[in-house]
Image (cartoon, rainbow, N blue to C red):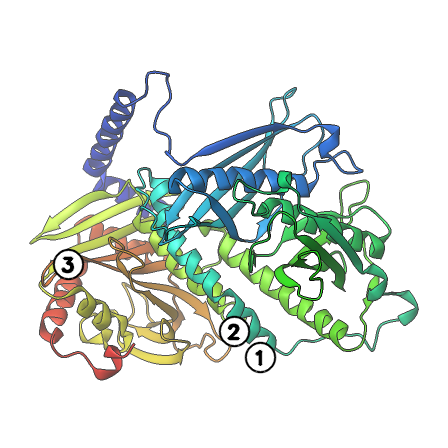
Amino acid sequence: MIQNVGNHLRRGFASVFSSRLSRKSASHAEKDDGAMAGGEGYRNPTEVQMSQLVLPCHTNQRGELSVGQLLKWIDTTACLSAERHAGCPCVTASMDDIYFEHTISVGQVVNIKAKVNRAFNSSMEVGIQVASEDLCSEKQWNVCKAFATFVAHRELSKVKLKQTTPQTEEEKTEHSVAAERRRMRLLYADTIKDLLANCVIQDDLESRDCSCMVPAERTRVESVELVLPPHANHQGNTFGGQIMAWMENVATIAASRLCRAHPTLKTIEMFHFRGPSQVGDRLVLKAIVNNAFKHSMEVGVCVEAYRQGAETQRRHINSAFMTFVVLDADDQPRTLPWIRPQPGDGERRYREASARKKIRLDRKYIVSCKQTEMPISVPWDPSNQVYLSYNNVSSLKMLVTKDNWVLSSEINQVRLYTLEDDKFLSFHMEMLVQVETIQAFLLLSDLLRRPEWDKHYRSVELVQQVDEDDAIYHVISPALGGDAKPQDFVILASRRKPCDNGDPYVIALRSVTLPTHPETPAYRRGETLCSGFCFWREGDQLTKVSYYNQATPGFLNYVTTNVAGLSSEFYTTVKACEQFLLDNRSDLAPSLQTL
């Protein structure tokens, strides 16, 4: 059946494919004409590259590049990129999660590339990519990818950053998704607080053999560092990378005291700098193993600063959590001894570490993995709601910024575009409507009203209003084609207002699973991977409305039939949506106006 659908699609798209080839040829020609005299093509004006040869002085006891040294290089490269855009000094404000995929040996080269993804008012997100290179074999490996936030700082005046102008598809994607990452950072502290307060954290302290446990106090480390001019920038503020390197050092010592071996740092959790430190400060770094799992351990690190003669007035600079493993001769994780926490704060840190481990897994699984590696329906629970919402919106934004959409048809100013990418066939419908953008956004945000214009939504039930931006619905849809049963969906709807001028209003939809709404014999459970609306203001009382959908296998035959022109249901539905907006543009429900 799949082969028949493919043949059908190829016949229906013959002219479209030839158009795409001609467009690609023209695009390549434009790139060739626009190449610089030196043979290089376009390069982001904020891009900074650093290459460092790993020498013995940069390595740890295993002959591998110290993560602390790598963090200093990463921070320096990212800071130079930020300052190139800002035109003034910048300081590190935060660093997102870093997952280290590969170690780097002495004699290899570290290649770091950083560029500003997006600028906000006085802060900007810098994307960093790190790769290693073996000069003898010419092999290269991805080491890690990171996102850092830098704040522009000028002593005598407030800084207002100019906006970046993305040019390539990759830059447009990162620029669009950066707003969603920023939202997640701002919510991060509250998310952790709510989860630790509301989640029931299970532990088996009472059932463990105490004779095989290591007291947590045995792993405690305290060290002091004097901030000297080489540790600071031209304004006298300590480099964020230098502080991170000192933190990695004490965390490694604490981890070594538990396992009596040389541990390997695998993850640094997202953290924020709470305030600056300057030349002359004394930094007190404290580390302790909070919890040891079967193959990994979490080490908590705290940094405080004080000036000479004022040791009692310490300033909290930063806290971070780092995850270590111990590798055997075959590079496989070794089993670690259990930790015995101290009563009181030690037990609290022990239980919080268990909660953070789940949060880290959710964040890595949902936020960091590729779209093709995501299951269509992800289980919904309070510990991952922020990251599912992020993935929902960012997936739609990434689909929108693709630059190889092909116009398939246009009927009465309703345009149908298609996109073949990876394993998916996607489409989007576009129209102009005589209605204010905010009104269109609010009207289509309420899925309870969608059956009024979309016959594919037979009934809609609001299952859970998660917050003002996210809600979960149970949707029942009539049977498609020759299906005997109607379909039902459990859908997470996430909506966003524009972060800045030029950004669209967004309503993103994706499937989730809920234990309260399992599959039933009466319906065939349907799934949507990525779909939703984007709204752009085109003028006074004029809005461009675009609907996007990444077709799943169960929906593919229906999509190809419409795209090939053998059905007009897409067009009919879009026109019904337009009429719904026109009929209700001055009749917004009070509940919608307050959202």
Classify residue 25 as left or right of residue 376.
left
Question: What amino acid type should be assigned to the residue bearing mark 2?
Answer: Pro
Query: Which residue is found at the position 19% from the left and 67% from the top?
Result: 440
Question: What amino acid type should be assigned to the residue bearing mark 1?
Answer: Asn
Badge 2 element: loop
Marks 3/1: CA–CA distance: 46 Å
Query: Which residue is found at the position 50% from the left and 31% from the top?
Result: 49
Tell me where residue 194 appears, x and y as whole percent: 54, 75
Near mark 1 (Cα within 10 A), the count class, few <14, some 14-19 or many ≥20, is: few
According to the picture, the residue beneath numbered tag 1 turns out to be 198
Are discs 2 and 1 less than 8 Å apart at CB?
yes
Q: Residue 325, can we see it?
A: no
Badge 3 element: helix
Mark number, residue 571: 3
Mark number, residue 488: none
Question: What amino acid type should be assigned to the residue bearing mark 3?
Answer: Tyr
Q: Quadrant of residue 84?
A: top left
Quarter of the image where the C terminus is located = bottom left
Of 257 and 239, nearer the camera is 239
Mark number, residue 382: 2
Badge 1 element: helix
Q: Nearer the viewer, mark 2 or mark 3?
A: 2
Marks 2/3: CA–CA distance: 38 Å
Q: Residue 191, can we see it?
A: yes
Q: Nearer the viewer, mark 2 or mark 1?
A: 1
Of 312 and 45, nearer the camera is 312
Q: Quadrant of residue 117?
A: top left
Are discs 3 and 1 less than 8 Å apart at CB?
no
Q: Quadrant of residue 210?
A: bottom right
Q: Residue furthest left?
A: 412
